[in-house]
Image (tube, rainbow, N blue to C red):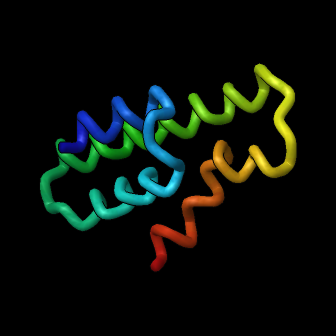
């Protein structure tokens, strides 16, 4: 499930809110799984920030690219 989620997020096929699902990976006790989740999260964050640097984005579009906007979904 996590690999499919990562792939869809990396290709921008899912909205940014789904990035918050990776926060649940910290609840798992397996260290290898946590490391994979952390890597997926870092790759997705870097990809979205790179996308913002590459093209001029309006303020409204930033809501769909900036990973900081997933924090409320992770908390909720």
Res 1 quadrant in image: top left
Q: Is residue 75 above or below residue 43?
A: below
Farthest-out residue, bottom: 76
Q: How many marks?
A: 0
Compared across the picture, whether 50 is left or right of 45 comes to right
Residue 64, image x and y in percent?
65, 47
Farthest-out residue, left: 30
Which residue is located at x 24 percent, y 35 percent?
A: 3
Residue 17, image x and y in percent?
49, 57
Farthest-out residue, top: 54
Q: Is residue 12 above or below residue 59?
A: above
Which residue is located at x 28 percent, y 57 percent?
A: 25
Q: Is residue 10 above or below residue 17?
A: above
Compared across the picture, whether 75 is left or right of 36 comes to right
Compared across the picture, whether 52 is left or right of 3 comes to right
Q: Nearer the viewer, residue 29 or 6?
A: 6
Which residue is located at x 37 percent, y 34 percent?
A: 8
Residue 43, image x and y in percent?
47, 32
Which residue is located at x 38 percent, y 37 percent?
A: 40
Residue 73, image x and y in percent?
50, 69
């Amino acid at each position: 499930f996590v690999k499919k989620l990562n792939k869809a997020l990396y290709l921008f096929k899912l909205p940014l809110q789904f990035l918050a699902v990776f926060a649940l990976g910290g609840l798992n006790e397996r260290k290898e799984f946590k490391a994979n989740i952390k890597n997926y999260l870092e790759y997705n964050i870097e990809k979205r920030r790179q996308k913002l640097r590459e093209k001029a984005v309006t303020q409204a579009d930033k809501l769909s690219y900036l990973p900081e906007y997933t924090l409320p979904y992770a908390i909720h």
